[in-house]
C-alpha cells in the first residue's frame, strides 16, 4: 500500500502526495515522502534509536530547553550578528544531533550545538 509520511518527526502521514501541515514539525510545509511499507511501521525498527543532543559543555539538550550563545554568530547572507550571551528559548531538536531549530530575532534559524550552552 503506497502512502506518504513526514520525515520531520511529527508522525504525519497521508494517503495523497501533500505537504506536512502539522504545527511545530521540523519539516512543516515540505513535501511528504513516499512509503511503500505493508506493516505500517514506515521502516522503523522495533528498537527506536535514541537521539542524544549535547551542548558545547556536554550537557544533554531536549525540546523546549533554553540556551545561550557562547560566541558572536553572523547570519549568513545578511549583516545581522547575534551576540555572545543572547538567550534562545524553546529550541527544537532535529534529526542531526549537531543542530537545533529555533526562533531568534523573529527568524527561524538552525544553530550548531557547538555554539550553545544550556541555561
Image (cartoon, helix red, strand yellow):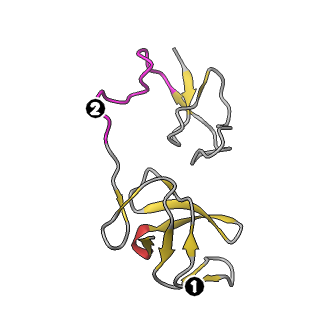
Quarter-of-image position of residue 59: bottom left
The vertical placement of 103 against 82, above or below, is above
Where residue 47 appears, as percent x and y from the top left, is 28, 32
User: What is the span of residues highlighted in magenta in the rendered image?
Assistant: 35-49
Question: Residues under labels 1 and 2: Cα distance?
Answer: 41 Å
Quarter-of-image position of residue 114: bottom left
Give the foreground label among 1 and 2: 1
Where residue 66 appears, as percent x and y from the top left, is 51, 65
* Magenta part, dominant SS: loop
Q: Residue at x 68, y 72 (%)?
A: 105
Label 1 close to label 2 by CB (< 8 Å):
no
Where residue 86 appears, as percent x and y from the top left, is 57, 79
Q: Residue at x 66, y 43 (%)?
A: 23
- In the displayed structure, does residue 48 sit left or right of residue 113? left
The vertical placement of 40 against 12, above or below, is above
- In the displayed structure, does residue 115 sit left or right of residue 2? left
Q: Secondary structure at mark 2?
A: loop
**In the foreground, 87 or 14:** 87
Q: Which residue is mark 1?
A: 83
Where residue 11 appears, as percent x and y from the top left, is 52, 32
**Mark 2 residue crowding within 10 angstroms, few (<14) / some (14–19) / many (20+):** few
Q: Which residue is mark 2?
A: 47
Q: Earlier in the sequence, mark 1 or mark 2?
A: 2
Residue 44 counted in the magenta span: yes
Amino acid at each position: 500500500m503506497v502512502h506518504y509520511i513526514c520525515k520531520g518527526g511529527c508522525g504525519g502521514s497521508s494517503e495523497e502526495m501533500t505537504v506536512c501541515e502539522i504545527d511545530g514539525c521540523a519539516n512543516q510545509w515540505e513535501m511528504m515522502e513516499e512509503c511503500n511499507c505493508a506493516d505500517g511501521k514506515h521502516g522503523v525498527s522495533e528498537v527506536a534509536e535514541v537521539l542524544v543532543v549535547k551542548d558545547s559543555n556536554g550537557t544533554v539538550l531536549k525540546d523546549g530547553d533554553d540556551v545561550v550563545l557562547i560566541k558572536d554568530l553572523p547570519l549568513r547572507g545578511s549583516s545581522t550578528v547575534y551576540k555572545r550571551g543572547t538567550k534562545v528559548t524553546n529550541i527544537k531538536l532535529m534529526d542531526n544531533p549537531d543542530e537545533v531549530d529555533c526562533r531568534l530575532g523573529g527568524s527561524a534559524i538552525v544553530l550548531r550545538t557547538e555554539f550553545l550552552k544550556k541555561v
